[in-house]
Image (cartoon, rainbow, N blue to C red):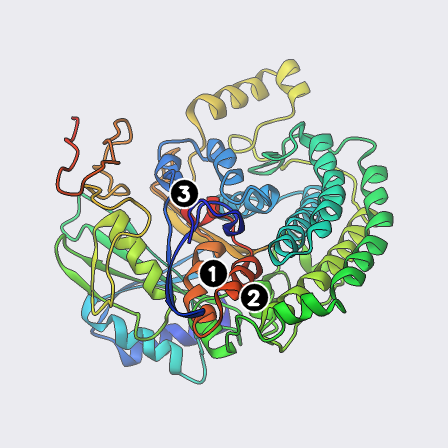
Amino acid sequence: MTEIHEKVEKKLRDSFSSSIREVSHFRDELTFLIEKDALLDVLRFLKDDPEFTYVFLTDLTATDWPDREERHEVVYQLYSFDSHTYVRIKVRAKQGEKVASATAIWDVANPFEREVYDLFGVEFEGHPNLTRILTPEGFEGFPLRKDYPLTYEVPQFTHSVDDPPEVIK
Amino acid sequence: MGPQHPATHGVLRLQLDLDGETVIKAQPIIGYLHTGIEKTAESKHYSKAIPLTDRMDYLSPMSNNLGYCLAVEKLLGIEIPEKAQWARVCLAELTRLNSHLVWVGTHALDIGAMSMMLYAFREREKILGIYELVSGQRMMSTYFRIGGLALDLPPNFDERVREILDLLPSRISEYEDLLTENPIWRNRTIGVAKISPEEALSCGLTGPLLRSCGIKHDLRKTNPYSSYEKFDFDIPTNDGCDVFARYVVKMEEMRQSLRIIRQALDGMPSGDYRAHAPGVVLPPKEKVLSEMESLIFHFKIITEGIHPPVGEVYQGIESPKGEIGFYIVSDGSPYPYRMRVRPPSFVHVGALDKMCQGGLVADVIAAIGSIDIILGEVDR
């Protein structure tokens, strides 16, 4: 584990002790699983702290765990140009629960969150334009969820929005 | 504008709000090429997802392969032999040349310099020839494997690459003679589609786009992978923040790539081209045919796949377009639980609105060309 990761872990544990659920180290990567409510505070803290400067949101994505009570896991990869290290922040949400939007901190969160909404159905609170981005208008379901089948295809393209296609099952 | 527009480099659609000729808002509408690569990868063995990565950014297949293989290798925790690493560097830099050549050709074509495209594609043919030489394929090479390379480098590889090394420096100078001082080119690019360094960071720009905003960041230097730390090269930057700055940075990057390739050829180590990791990496074919144990490993890897430890890794590399990252979650089964691609093009499309606001319609074309997007990667 690198020195900077040790510092990040210590300082985050001091500042957000009640919000941190789990810290894991795997292959020199540092991952925090935190409470959903503290998300924006933690992201801002890591971004603004002069010692860490995780100013760059490299990636924002999600994973789907249908067996868990909180099925959605939203993953943030932050990068620091000073220490050249990544930190991963994860939050979990139940189906239907909203996650705070990071669009106020980074513009790049806008397309990323739309993508997560499109493919996983996670809603972000405070997003200015949360609409589908990759799948066509009127698409049903969320393709990257584990219970979305790989083997059948819904006819997607119709000539009328008022007359949506019938889903073949 | 679009999706069937020759200057959108594929099927990008832009919803432009105009006031006369001035752009008020440019909303990109994407997804026409969405093929669900991330979903497909979840139902494939780790090694079988490599060909999918070629098909995202089809101008830089080797870089995509490299990013994915490095991510899986990180997950598995295996060491790659030096020869394979150096060969990967050499081919990844050839890929950068390939991608930048197509970029300079098509971008100049969009702005009206038609002859550029013919020249750039002429040189690109030579690089595709190298792809064909090593893998048998000109575009979808799928040459890298988890643990090394698919095959050893062919004997005339060195000679063929050196032909390119001797040819390209003068050709790059020719391109610059055609463009850099060309008044039409300068008028169409200088001060066009500007984005400030702060906005660039907020929009998540990486690669040449970020470096053309004066931010010296390159994952090959800062987070070296595949033994890039052993190579001597410079990171070109420019403070222009506009289309011209991106052009200057990319042209210089091509020269730096040539430097790296030359070093890789000169110092190419001998040895294995694939790691020795029984049960994870396929054993050499001659051993499979002569040793029982190797045959068993071969059979098990092909039929069952590999079983990486439970965990998650993120590996970002400097692809020609920017940072391409692979986030892989493993649940211990032979199939990735989740394979996420962080595509640079997807992020860069999101910044188009900021670049185009206040400009003219004709500048939108210059902006699209300068961000160098591949729609296959935007939509995946």
- Give the farthest residue toward the front: B20
Q: Nearer the viewer, residue B295 or B367?
A: B367
* N-term mark: 2 or 3: 2
| Count of marks overlaid on the render | 3
Q: Which residue is mark 1?
A: B348
What residue is drawn where x is 14% and y is 31%? A166
Going from the N terminus, do you reach mark 1 or mark 3 first?
Answer: 3
What's the CA distance linking mark 1 and mark 2? 9 Å
Q: Which mark is residue B309?
A: 3
* Residue at the disc numbered 2: B209
Rate crowding at label 3 as few (under 14), some (14 to 19) or many (20 or more) other CA atoms within 10 Å.
some
| Three-letter amino acid code at the position of disc 2 | Leu
Q: In the rendered structure, are the residues bearing label 1 and label 2 in contact, judged by CB atoms less than 8 Å apart?
A: yes
- As helix, strand or loop, the secondary structure at mark 3 comes to loop
Q: Earlier in the sequence, mark 1 or mark 2?
A: 2
Share a chain, discs 1 and 3? yes
The quadrant of the rendering that contains the N terminus of chain B is bottom left
- Do circles 2 and 3 both sit on a common chain? yes
Judging depth in this view, the residue of A156 and B74 nearest the camera is A156
The secondary structure type at the circle numbered 2 is helix
* Amino acid type, mark 1: His
Which marked residue is nearer to the observer: mark 1 or mark 3?
1
Q: Chain of mark 2?
A: B
Q: Position of residue A96 (x, y in %)?
A: 12, 55
Quadrant for residue B215, please give it.
Answer: bottom right
Q: Position of residue B302 (x, y in %)?
A: 49, 23
